[in-house]
């Protein structure tokens, strides 16, 4: 009875997956074995098999090689896969998500659906912790006895349904994880034209700035030459197809380069501001420490540099900056006292003048005469001459910046 149940379960898996396989898929006995093409009837006997045809993408396969690989989709909040094909020895597995509508990947297929599917695949792979370098040509054969296959459900997915569980990355984020060689290898999965297109545009985003002074004609020639270099597949694209891709990329990048460059400048500016804040948070305490050590007069610049693990030139520059920007507490207090005394004297004199004037209006002529006599007898406020203030500034500047060792020599310390 148990054998019949197992056989019925295997037949259910076979009925679900076999119609989706290519008629003549690639297949292999393992990583170290050659890849051959066989009819579907014979290919299903191999442990590794091609899941998607070269012209359409029906199944998303994720190569998950870490612990709890079979149920990681549940931990990260993604939809349950249709099939889990697990290696019973290592626990690593391939997760199969079957699409309701296959994505066309032949050379003349539309690029937008391919890029949309590619972005979804990348986002899901990141959440699952799957191998981002997995090319997708061969996968674990769900019908082979070497693997432990689990069929969770037979419901198929649309791309929009898969994209509901996460935020799609933009193409610049995709570029961070995809180098040119990785993109060219993914041509087996997404199509050769999509691989050439992605390689070409990622190169063109930066290269266009070198051709701004030459004109569009030379730029288009450079893009076409680069596209022909990327077309190094076993069965390359036609020159006509490469020409269409190169023209599309050249026109779009040439038109939008100003906007991209401005966004790049803004991003670099924001990064610079953030790094500047962090750098100042680290440097400022060291500057303060260096200035305090120098003020004590017991350390030379070379000794301070050794203590703070900096060069003497850096310490010298820091001290100059601190001297020009920071006023010592003693100097500030003396200047404040001097300015405060002058302002206080001026305010008192103005108040006395107002009182005398007001009282003179109310008194008799005799009293007014006396009052005027008193006012005349009172001398005008004697302000400190400008030369004296300048001399005071010079004295306190010399006093605060003179090393204490020198002060002791003249009897000040």
Image (tube, rainbow, N blue to C red):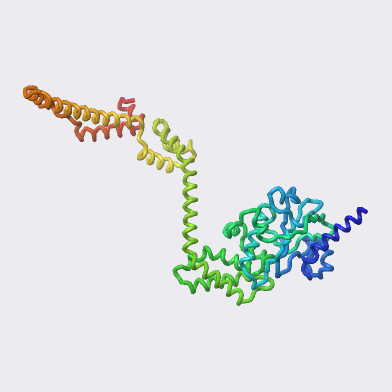
Name the outermost residue toward the right.
Answer: 1
Q: Nearer the viewer, residue 386 or 377?
A: 377
Q: At x 76% / y 57%, what residue is drawn? A: 82
Q: Nearer the viewer, residue 175 or 167?
A: 167
Picture quadrant where residue 199 is located: bottom right
Q: Nearer the viewer, residue 285 or 110?
A: 110
Q: Does 111 appear above or below 330?
A: below
Q: Is residue 214 left or right of residue 403?
A: right
Picture quadrant where residue 101 is located: bottom right
Q: At x 79% / y 70%, what residue is drawn? A: 23
Q: Is residue 255 left or right of residue 399?
A: right
Q: At x 43% / y 43%, what residue is drawn? A: 314
Q: Does 352 appear above or below 306?
A: above
Q: How many marks?
A: 0
Q: Position of residue 136 (x, y in %)?
A: 71, 62
Q: Position of residue 200 (x, y in %)?
A: 58, 67
Which quadrant is the C terminus positioned in?
top left
Which quadrant is the N terminus positioned in?
bottom right
Q: Position of residue 356 (x, y in %)?
A: 15, 26
Q: Does 19 appear above or below 284?
A: below
Q: At x 52% / y 68%, what residue is drawn? A: 252
Picture quadrant where residue 187 is located: bottom right
């Amino acid at each position: 009875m148990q054998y019949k149940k197992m056989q019925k379960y295997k037949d259910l898996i076979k009925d679900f997956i076999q119609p989706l396989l290519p008629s003549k898929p690639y297949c292999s006995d393992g990583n170290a074995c050659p890849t051959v093409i066989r009819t579907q009837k014979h290919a299903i006997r191999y442990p590794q098999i091609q899941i998607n045809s070269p012209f359409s993408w029906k199944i998303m396969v994720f190569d998950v090689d870490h612990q709890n690989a079979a149920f990681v989709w549940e931990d990260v909040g993604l939809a349950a896969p249709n099939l889990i094909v697990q290696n019973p020895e290592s626990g690593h597995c391939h997760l199969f998500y079957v699409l309701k509508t296959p994505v066309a990947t032949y050379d003349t297929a539309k690029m937008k659906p391919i890029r949309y599917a590619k972005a979804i695949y990348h986002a899901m792979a990141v959440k699952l912790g799957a191998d981002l370098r997995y090319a997708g040509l061969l996968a674990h054969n769900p019908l082979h006895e070497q693997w432990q296959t689990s069929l969770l459900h037979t419901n198929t997915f649309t791309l929009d349904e898969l994209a509901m569980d996460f935020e799609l990355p933009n193409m610049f984020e995709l570029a961070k994880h995809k180098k040119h060689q990785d993109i060219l290898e993914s041509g087996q999965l997404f199509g050769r034209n999509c691989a050439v297109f992605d390689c070409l545009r990622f190169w063109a985003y930066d290269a266009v700035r070198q051709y701004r002074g030459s004109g569009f004609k030379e730029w288009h020639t450079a893009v076409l030459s680069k596209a022909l270099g990327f077309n190094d597949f076993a069965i390359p694209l036609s020159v006509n197809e490469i020409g269409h891709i190169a023209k599309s990329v050249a026109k779009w990048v040439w038109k939008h380069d100003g906007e991209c460059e401005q966004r790049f400048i803004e991003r670099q500016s924001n990064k610079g501001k953030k790094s500047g804040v962090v750098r100042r948070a680290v440097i400022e305490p060291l500057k303060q420490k260096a200035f305090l050590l120098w003020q004590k007069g017991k350390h030379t610049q070379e000794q301070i540099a050794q203590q703070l693990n900096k060069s003497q030139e850096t310490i010298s520059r820091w001290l100059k900056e601190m001297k020009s920007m920071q006023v010592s507490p003693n100097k500030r207090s003396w200047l404040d006292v001097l300015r405060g005394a002058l302002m206080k004297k001026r305010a008192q004199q103005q108040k006395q003048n107002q009182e005398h004037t007001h009282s003179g209006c109310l008194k008799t002529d005799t009293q007014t005469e006396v009052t005027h006599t008193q006012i005349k007898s009172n001398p005008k406020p004697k302000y400190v001459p400008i030369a004296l203030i300048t001399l005071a500034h010079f004295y306190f500047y010399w006093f605060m910046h003179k090393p204490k060792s020198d002060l002791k020599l003249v009897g000040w310390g």
